[in-house]
Amino acid sequence: MSMLVVVLFSAICLITAYYTYGPLLVRLLHLDPNVDTPATTMRDDVDYVPIESKFLLSQHFSAIAAAGPIVGPILAGVTFGWVPALIWILVGSIFIGGVHDFTALVASIRHKARSIAEVVRDHMSPRSYVLFLSFVWMALIYIIVAFTDVTASSFLGNQPLENDAVVLGGGIATSSLLYLLIPIIMGLVLRYKLMTVNVATVVFLPLVALSIWGGQYIPFDVGQIFNLSPASAQRFWNVSLLAYCLIASVIPMWLLLQPRGHLGGYFLYAVLLAGGLGIVFGGKTIEYDAFRGFDVPDADGMPRPLVPLLFITIACGACSGFHSIIASGTTSKQLRKETDARLVGYGAMLMEAMVAIISLCCVMMLKPTDPLINGGTPKPNFLYAIGIGNFMGLLGIPQTFAVSFGLMAFTTFVYDTLDVCTRLGRYIIQELTGLSGSAGKWLGTILTAGVPLIFLLGQPIAPNGKPVAIWLIYWNLFGASNQLLAALTLLGVSVWLWRTYRAAWVIPVVGVPCVLMYTMSMWALLRMIWPPPLTAAAAAKAAASQTVVPVPVVASVLAILGVLILVEALIAVLGPLPKPPAEEPRLATA
């Protein structure tokens, strides 16, 4: 089968959903373009700034579409086959993830653009607010752990290509360092009004392309330069990336985050364009297995059941709790009109689904015996980069540059995630401790960037002497915590809608997705707490892969928090009906 058929079918489904289910959601929540949003009524030109929907869409999309819609679909596609992965991406994004993002954004603007945690506090209890913030902070920690480690691996080793060329990991490191320097210069230029945004974009975008090309000629290979083992080199980059998180989250946003986010948005669109053109004109056929079974053993003979693992392996791209933090944290403060929530909240989720489908295509074009599959445990960053490189190669772009571009795009997406997670983690610590000013700022930042360091410094070594991928150890934990965060967000939104309006549509539209995500994520956490009996090979690997804090311990804490928040929600739902808050506009009742 041609991949073009699958991609066209997926695009039609997503576009149809936007123009049918999207308007239904708008009607049910009775969005009114004439109602003033917090961005207008509370405008301060710092946090609350109304901007055009097309610019807000780009900003929001860049913030939510990190490495998740790349890594998850690749892992799930390799493990279970491309059909289950595709079905979950389409169904999840349209009926669960899109609803989650959209309702979280609307809930925030109906509560003066406050965070989803504060919505929970208003409609459940102050205790649930503390529980929710604690859960969010732990989820952010494991997002940082997983994405830091998988990005560090991009800077190590070499990736041979079909034309006998080689992409150097040290070259990607050089390009990444240059990529962080370029936005700083751009930020200074814009700050002191030496150029307009349009002129700066024209000047600095080619410099980014030049850094991708030039990095391969001046590789920063820390293993060779400092004579480090692979495990030590991995630790070096893990520590360096966390140091970057610490610095990036406390310096002014105009100096790095805003210009880098501006340039990073072009990466996103370029990857989508390159993937789309490559699929349309490349004539690629599907080589990989459509379905590999409901229980697929890994290389050590351990079972990997389709349910619940599919639902937590693919988080971003189908449904992601992380999106609610972005939607209610920054996006809601910039939404110009209520009706813009359809494009920004629902539309961005469907766009991310398309990113996930292109990532899945990178698996679909491979044969099951391809070395990139790596016995069922692929390196998603390299597999994705090779796939994007193949698509771009069909357009006449040299493969070495194309693959380097793919790896840089992956790294760029992760930088966005690490920045946002560290900054949000700092806000949560300040909120929980009540500390403000420099003390709260540095305590929150050091804790949020420092705790992941504990996990990443304890680099496990396999019996063959090679470092065990820490991100792979924690990916399911990250996925389960992220999906449980989505479930808890939907739970908070459901409580708000049900207690205030008792609208019948709340149950199928928001309640059912909440129950599904809660069930899948708790099921996955329980499998981590009480795993199935280990095979001999798995036991040997587990003994060599002991981490500082065992996964079952963390999974237990997350599960307990999830149960406590559910109890708070049930108490709120079964309690006396409150008077609807005066600031909330009307909702449809059917």
Image: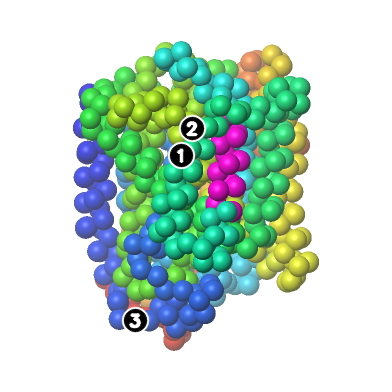
Amino acid type at mark 2 = Trp
Q: Is residue 518 above or below residue 289?
A: below
Depth check: give the residue in front, 388 or 582: 388
Q: CA distance from mark 1 to mark 3?
A: 43 Å
Depth check: give the residue in front, 566 or 44: 44
The residue labelled by disc 2 is 213
Amino acid type at mark 1 = Ala
Res. 152 image quadrant: top right
The residue labelled by disc 3 is 35
Q: Is residue 447 above or below residue 583?
A: above
Q: Secondary structure at mark 1?
A: helix
Residue 583 in magenta stretch: no
Q: Are marks 2 and 1 in contact (CB under 8 Å)?
A: yes
Q: Residue 445: which disc? A: none
The residue labelled by disc 1 is 209
Q: Nearer the viewer, mark 3 or mark 2?
A: 2
Q: Earlier in the sequence, mark 3 or mark 2?
A: 3
Q: Is residue 458 visible?
A: yes
